[in-house]
Amino acid sequence: MNKIYNPDKAEWSTVLKRPTQTVADIEQTVEAIFKEVQSNGDETLKKYTEKFDGVVLENFVVSKDEIEEASTLVSQELKDAIQLAKNNIEVFHKAQKTSKVLVETAKGVQCWQEKRPIQKVGLYIPGGTAPLFSTILMLAVPATIAGCEELVLCSPPNKEGKINPAILYTANLCGVKKIFKVGGIQAIASMTFGTESIPEVYKIFGPGNQFVTVAKQIATKYGISIDMPAGPSELLVLADDSANAAFVASDLLSQAEHGVDSQVILVSTSKDMIDAVEKEVEKQLLELPRKDIAEKAIANSKLIYVADDQTANDLINAYGPEHYIVCVENEDFFVNNIKNAGSVFIGNYTPESAGDYASGTNHTLPTNGYAKQYSGVNLDSFMKSMTFQKINETGIKEIGAAIEIMAEAEGLYAHKNAVTLRLNSLKNE
Amino acid sequence: MNKIYNPDKAEWSTVLKRPTQTVADIEQTVEAIFKEVQSNGDETLKKYTEKFDGVVLENFVVSKDEIEEASTLVSQELKDAIQLAKNNIEVFHKAQKTSKVLVETAKGVQCWQEKRPIQKVGLYIPGGTAPLFSTILMLAVPATIAGCEELVLCSPPNKEGKINPAILYTANLCGVKKIFKVGGIQAIASMTFGTESIPEVYKIFGPGNQFVTVAKQIATKYGISIDMPAGPSELLVLADDSANAAFVASDLLSQAEHGVDSQVILVSTSKDMIDAVEKEVEKQLLELPRKDIAEKAIANSKLIYVADDQTANDLINAYGPEHYIVCVENEDFFVNNIKNAGSVFIGNYTPESAGDYASGTNHTLPTNGYAKQYSGVNLDSFMKSMTFQKINETGIKEIGAAIEIMAEAEGLYAHKNAVTLRLNSLKNE
């Protein structure tokens, strides 16, 4: 672990630098597969499923039988845990519903804002070693509350042509009716254009590797929107002497086990706490099954000592962490003054893994500093805001002259005329 | 104008097709200028300002003197109109403020959502024939209500090295302190990377030509977010025999004068209304200063007759218009059932130009069918939603076991351990 004491403000951007991603290199590959899927649909899916997933599939649809089989393979204990998490996620995301905002801005001028669901959304769930069924909860639950009409889920098959039972069980529990065994670039391209099997959607959500990340970026060029750009997961813990070093170390490691490129940072105004956490990390690391991954991420991690709270807060805002744990006595100062973070975890009994799974908040969060401008996934991510207005005779008399003057000043005379005609018709009455 | 009667559902996508944009062709030009601005900053701005705007500038900053001069050049009448519009826009966007959403999802598990401002935002205002000072109101007013700390405005200089007075007056009125005489691709690149003169921002808003549109898309590859992808402006009017054909024609023309690629569509269940609007358009067209532009857009416009309200509504949702005027007796049916539209204008006295300028709603709206998944600009466009959670000893006992089981099922043992350590510490108490 790299210990850094009182870094100069001029060095912050170097100290806080994230690893560079080499997105440009794979753009051409992604564009080529997109074009192929657009032209040849399912044929292309078969080809790349064989090439990348090592299995020949005649049919990409997950059948009812497969879903029933999956349900028998998931333990009751896990089903209960998923249900508890689902309940909490539902409660938190239902509370985010907003009502119509209606204002009479001038006499006779009624304006309102309403949110309506995005009709068709696509959820991408990666395969690989960790079957991320928890991500289905985080996406399908708010999509359903929002009222999205069509949920399409794609996840890559394993070499036996199957999807992990926990993924199928959770998708079915959340009411996802259209589940397809397609992964990677070809899955994102399918949801972008639609194929014989797979419906096109308007917005695509979900995590993935570098190829999926670039594919989602390319999808936006074809008019699809996405949840947010992705990057390696990251955690910043702020701890003072009131924190528990063992707890802090366990949180840093839970981030580190995600991948060798995970970002792990500790900021503290206590040198003792930094040393204590370092020892605890070394101790706990030995016990982890994913030790090899975590070890590499930890080697790149940073323990940063700063002299005072204000500097700590400025440094953290300059970084904009995806996950931010606040374990300090003066927690109100930091909670009130954090400007850039995906999700904030407060106090000794609030591990990041609570938000990853079961507290109710969403775990799809902006990484890579994107917390400066992107929201984490929330209910509004599945809706769009529309405005409405209704102006009566009184209203157009109130604001008509202003519209005429402004339209003329912008040189848009037909805009002016649309008002003039209406005002004249009222003079003649 | 093209009249289309009862198009078959299978033909809708052809009938409603928007003109293709050739974005790919200019990507390389844009990428090259981005790289140059990133490396050489202001030097590059000077070069391209001379090349594209035809003026040599030593300093891009708009001075206090220039702003004072601009104020003397704007008529009191226009100042009053701008003030009226600003007031209405403020009222409507202030009403969109949301309060903290706080929920105890389980005993001892407090979760909340708060919105915090994006610290640095960039506003791009095009130059050219129409000085879009109204767009400054639509962007700077909500940015200020949101609490954005730094507003940067870029607009291209004319051949005398000046910016239109109405633009400078409005920017100053809205409290924009950093105004720069830079346009086009180089302006978007400057706000993406920052130069010696121009600060980098986190999110870029505003309209522009094809080059600006592509530049904003490229900016997203460098971690900047944008308001939304752009396309030619468009209007769909739904009218039955209760509508006023002259008013409808004036609205269609106010859209048509924007540009030759503007999209203008009338949908009606009345053949008489279609014929009447056609005649009115021909008549009003003759009087317009921007007749040449409007004429070309009108030549591509479509008057679509459909047999019944349900079909009309389905067709309109398939299109997803940016602006949607509803002038029918049965207006509630259409207002309640519109799923995809940027902004909806209801009744005979609600011209689109009301929303363009002064009613209070925002005129930065999704075109090109993006209303299916993008919101128009609103207060939330200048903020990001963050989540917070605080779990106490009781709370971690409530949900800890579920987290452990789920983390284990996803193969993430360090995630599990972060909870196990905390639960164990409570057992020992």
Image: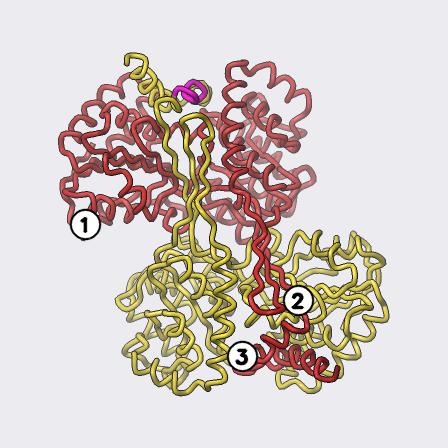
Chain colours: A yellow, B red
Where is residue A282? Give x, y as percent. 75, 81
Amino acid carrying mark 3 in the image: Met
> What chain is tagged by disc 2?
A
Image position of A208 with respect to B149: above or below: below
Question: Mark on residue B406?
Answer: 3
Residue depicted at x 50% and y 55%: A96
Task: Verify whether residue A400 appears in magenta.
Answer: yes
Nearer mark to the viewer, of 2 and 3: 3
Chain part drawn in magenta: A397-403
Instruction: Say which element carries label 3.
Output: helix
The chain to which mark 3 is attached is: B
Is B96 placed left or right of A292 in the picture? left
Q: Chain of mark 1?
A: B
Return the x and y of residue A411 as percentages of the image width and height. 42, 21
- The residue tagged 2 is A235
Q: What residue sits 35% from the left and 26% below the top? A: A392
Distance from disc 1 to disc 3, alpha carbons, whole Å, reads 49 Å
